[in-house]
Image (tube, rainbow, N blue to C red):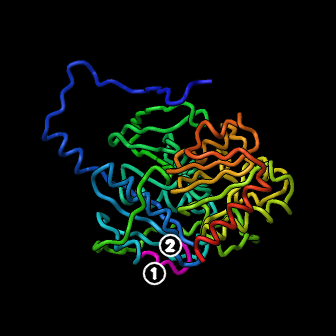
Amino acid sequence: MFPAATKFFGRVSPPVGHCVSGASRSAIGRRLSTLAVLEQRGGQLKHGSLRSFTAAQKLGGHVHGFIAGSKVTAAAEEAAHMDGVEQITTVENEIYEKGLPESYAQLLVDNIKKGNYTHVVASHTAFGKSILPRVAALLDSQQISDVTSIEDEKTFVRPIYAGNAIATVESSDPVKIITIRGTAFAPAAPGSGSATVVPGADPKAEATSEWVSEDLAKSDRPDLATASKVVSGGRGLKSKQDFDKVMLPLADALGAAVGASRAAVDSGYADNSLQVGQTGKVVAPQLYMAVGISGAIQHLAGMKDSKVIAAINKDADAPIFQVADVGLVGDLFEKVPELTGKIRNSKA
């Protein structure tokens, strides 16, 4: 296992004697153009995907947005108000509403070629991870996934080995396909932007897959991916009944989203949409409270960038205490209800 923050560098050096003048660099910069792929659901813009604008602006050059689906006009107009964005390309077609990669990937490729973009950026979400690999294959490019930092238009930083090592990679592909870790880039906020909204190319290819149905877990609590406070439960909660009895009142008292470790999800204590970790969601809230979570490296990969980490565990030697800012050793079935009561009383 590599120690934390180990760095790997993969760079291609320029030929000996090759020199790029300031004017040439300026010309190259003017040719840079990035297409940020935005997500929407039911005509509502997913604000987390706007972080791709932040990443695109770090690349320099022109920044355009892309959104497709059914009734996306309102979402496109909202995105058009972001500062630094010049154009929002839209495609209105029901076939793209659910983001099925078999049709959406070809749609993106056609618009990338039409706009002659040098970079394509999307969030490292289920949507981005499903579609962009197909786009990269169709464009014969090597995708660079889960980018946490952009050094320049061809050099990117990304974690590997569950975050135990950091790789710096350089791409020479004419079109660079990138997914970004949302927690690593500041959220874009509406400003005084006035990007033009234009229709994009629609290949109207025959669909090779069909959307059948979905079963969504509904909750009035904050969204796990974007919440400023998260409380997560682990295997130490012993059952789904105890998970709900202990964790839900704590989340409500704090106004927090609910998360879970993979062990808790695999044991049936919580829905898999709540999983935090390497194979779940990556979060970086202001407060992350880990209850009954030992702190396996796979879980830490999903929450170690949180601003304040608090842990409650009866095992004083649990790895979670090595990354926690605040730790409480004790029986969670006693300590968490006590904490919940004190939080409620402080608000009374």
Please state the extent of the stretch shown in magenta in the rendering. 69-76
What is the quadrant of the N terminus in the image? top right
Residue beneath the point at 80% across and 65% down = 245
* Percent x, y of residue 102: 63, 59
Residue 63 lies in quadrant? bottom left
What whole-number distance in Å separates the C-alpha atoms at marks 2 and 1?
A: 8 Å
Residue kind at label 2, given as amino acid type: Leu
Query: Viewer-proximal residue, 24 or 202?
Result: 24
Image position of 339 (left or right of 41): right
Image position of 19 (left or right of 2): left
Q: Label for residue 74?
A: 1
Query: Viewer-proximal residue, 143 or 205?
Result: 143
Q: Compared to 249, does 131 lie above or below?
A: above
Residue beneath the point at 41% across and 39% down = 156
Whether residue 71 is in magenta: the answer is yes
Image position of 188 (left or right of 182): left
Q: Are marks 2 and 1 in contact (CB under 8 Å)?
A: yes
Image position of 108 (left or right of 170): right
